[in-house]
Amino acid sequence: MQTLAHFADGGPGPWILFFPLIWAAVVIGGITLLRRTVWRGRRGSWRPAPDDNSPIAVLGHRFASGEIDEDEYWRRLSVLDEQFGRTGKGGAA
């Protein structure tokens, strides 16, 4: 009687290819689990924490609370982006 472990000439047969796939799934699953749990908390440690007192954050809070309308928000945000935005001083990219 031939089994899958002893294919035609006594070798492991095509199932030998299945075991690397299992190990790849275990490694990928472990990395995914680490990325979603442990490494997520460390992600922000190298970046500066968002400042809730920055003018752009204050403007966002005022818009969210309904103190200003959308047109006023975008008008003020465009002015603030020139000074505090990502383009840097002088508008150079």
Image (cartoon, rainbow, N blue to C red):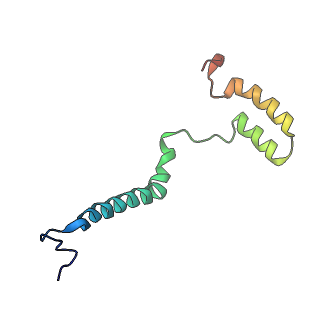
Occupied quadrant, residue 72? top right
Give the answer, above or below, for where 90 lies relative to 69: above
Which image quadrant for residue 83?
top right
In the image, is 74 to the left or to the right of 32? right
Residue 5 higher or lower than 91, as above or below: below
Q: Residue at x 20, y 78 (%)?
A: 3
Identified at 71% across, 23% down, the residue is 82
Q: Position of residue 27 (x, y in %)?
A: 34, 58
Residue 13, percent from left and from top? 21, 67
On screen, residue 52 versus residue 79, left or right, reads: left
Q: Position of residue 68 (x, y in %)?
A: 86, 40
Image vertical order of residue 61 relative to residue 75, above or below: below
Q: Residue at x 25, y 67 (%)?
A: 15
Of the 4 image quadrants, the one containing the N terminus is: bottom left
Name the spot of residue 47 as percent of width and height, x first. 52, 39
* Horizontal side, residue 21 vs residue 78: left or right: left
Choose top left, top right, bottom left or bottom right for residue 54.
Answer: top right
* Residue at image coords 45%, 54%: 35
